Image: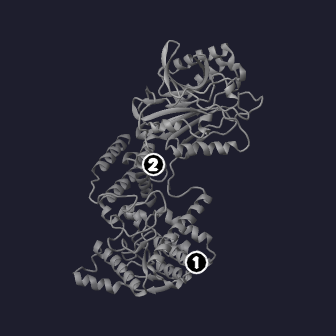
Amino acid sequence: MKHGFVKTAAVTPDIRVADVAYNTEQICRLIDKTAEEGAKVTVFPELCVTGYTCGDLFTQELLLKRAREALHIIASHTEGKDGIIFAGAPVAVDGELYNVAAAFGGGKILGLTTKTFLPNYGEFYEMRQFRPGPPQAREIFFDGERIPFGPQLLFTAREMDSLIISAEICEDVWSPVPPSIEAVREGAVLIVNCSASDETVGKADYRRSLIAGQSARLICGYVYANAGEGESTTDLVFGGHNLIAENGTVLACARRFENGVVYSEIDIQRLNGERRKNTTFQAADERRLIRIPFSIGWEETKLTRQFPALPFVPDETGERNRRCEEILMIQAMGLKKRLMHTGAESAVVGISGGLDSTLALLVTAKAFDMLGYDRSGITAVTMPCFGTTDRTYRNACKMGRKLGAELREVPIGDSVLCHFRDIGHSKDRQDVTFENAQARERTQVLMDIANQTGGLVIGTGDMSELALGWATYNGDHMSMYGVNASVPKTLVKHLVHYYADTCEDKELREVLYDVLDTPVSPELLPPKDGVIAQKTEDLVGPYELHDFFLYYMLRFGYAPGKIFRLARETFADEYSPEVIYKWLRTFYRRFFSQQFKRSCLPDGPKVGTVALSPRGDWRMPSDASVTIWIEELETAGKELKRQN
């Protein structure tokens, strides 16, 4: 459970219809198996103790008696085992028969959750044998013990108070108002479903979207265990379609028509963090559901789920292309509105031959096309100075011409040297003043040309640079509209690549591909043998790491230790733990110390779930202390040293 991860299992056992002893044996065997795998929450299908397809055999006293005995056998089997188990069974109470999800833990039956919505249409006729659960839960005497009985029971872990589980049964989640809604409003963060949903053409896709959608709507984890082979095929076939979802994402999905187990880890910290940020997620005004404690061991859960190395970039090519097209449209629409509002028919873009300025120029061209403006109204300005290489200079010029912009070259070397003389700075002293004087001179040139043309200076800096403060204050930090402000560096590359892949101009495509192959650099220090000498990632760290850190810090509020752990798992084949630790420490130090630059950002469009606008997603004091984050990271560093 360290870092909030709880391992869950959705299980489809081999069963025989009405053979309770055999079914119980299989359930207990699989409880042992999931326990060995470290699962803390294990879910079995609906009525799996007897089989869902017993039909009118559910009216037989002997079957119900054996099912009742089986519940005690299963409960006893959980003695000494860690976590909580859910399994479906028929239970008679006060002369009525109910379809329940029994919860087991610590050798006891913890509670009996009743099914609320009984399907009685098509192939289903549950109301022939069962009764809907009562409106509210209560305690009943069950073989001499008081046991909670009814809908929406809440099972709470003693050792992890944020882990609150509630169960529903099959049709409940297909209903207009699933019982899980009220359970979640009273604190449930994990919903389990004991199900017996038969297979028909197209149903699997709908089922998958239903479970994913319910987990997203309720900002919860959802473990869905479905009946499979072994159920009667008199009229129906069950495929064992087990699913584990978290806030809209399916983490694990069983192959249909194969009985077995799927596992994944639900991130309880992430879910609670999402709920805290979402103001439309509202808790119930009063507490009326029964809470039942259970025990769960505290340990570091072994992770089997994957965390994408590039969380801002979709893995699948088709989805990535759709995402790129959508982002380019959002960027261009934002700039289009700003140009219309200000009445500007000119835009000024400083182009360096690097990725960010390339993307900004492409977006500006797209906005001009949408407005019906001639692209000659775009002034593409290249400003060579001490660090400019022939490669980037040529690419900048070619790109400006191919896009139909007016290309202007303004060498700034003499102006910067004059400035050095004015402030008494030696041109041989290649320090931060040497670098930033060039960046500020370039911004002044762009602003003045914008005044000449009656246009707007289009910002080129990306979100990764803003997170790290890798921008010269009042230099490239400043513009009149920042089209890349919420686009991370790892995504900038894919946007430019997408544009290159889809553009029809062969020469422009070749230029863009060469830009993609050029090392990221501000080019503020003189080149060595004509080659870029100043590589950003050598100085500040790999952007793929920083974007990973940024995503999980801002999107989910993860602590440094947890981010370090995920990064170690994700980048194990690319970076050593020591390297990851070094750059994560750099990330936090820079993120906190450079907030003052983000506090006065120009306007720019938000394109994704993570953004740093001080007017929207990220409002942070410029002088907030980083101490507790560094302290926690140092703790993780000490653990790393002990492991080595």
Return the mark for residue 280.
Answer: 2
**In which quadrant of the rendered view does residue 87 lie?**
top right
Relative to 515, 410 lies left or right: left
Q: Amino acid at mark 2?
A: Thr
**Secondary structure beneath label 2:** loop
Relative to 431, 376 lies left or right: right
- At x 62%, y 25%, the residue is 131
- Gap in Å between the C-alphas at discs 2 and 1? 47 Å
Residue 261 appearing in the image: no
Q: Amino acid at mark 1?
A: Leu
**Secondary structure beneath label 1:** helix
Q: Residues within 10 Å of mark 1 (few under 14, many from 20)?
A: many
Relative to 543, 204 lies left or right: right
Say if 357 sits above or below 278 in the image: below
Q: Earlier in the sequence, mark 2 or mark 1?
A: 2
Say if 527 sits above or below 189 in the image: below
Looking at the image, which is closer to me, 42 or 50? Answer: 50
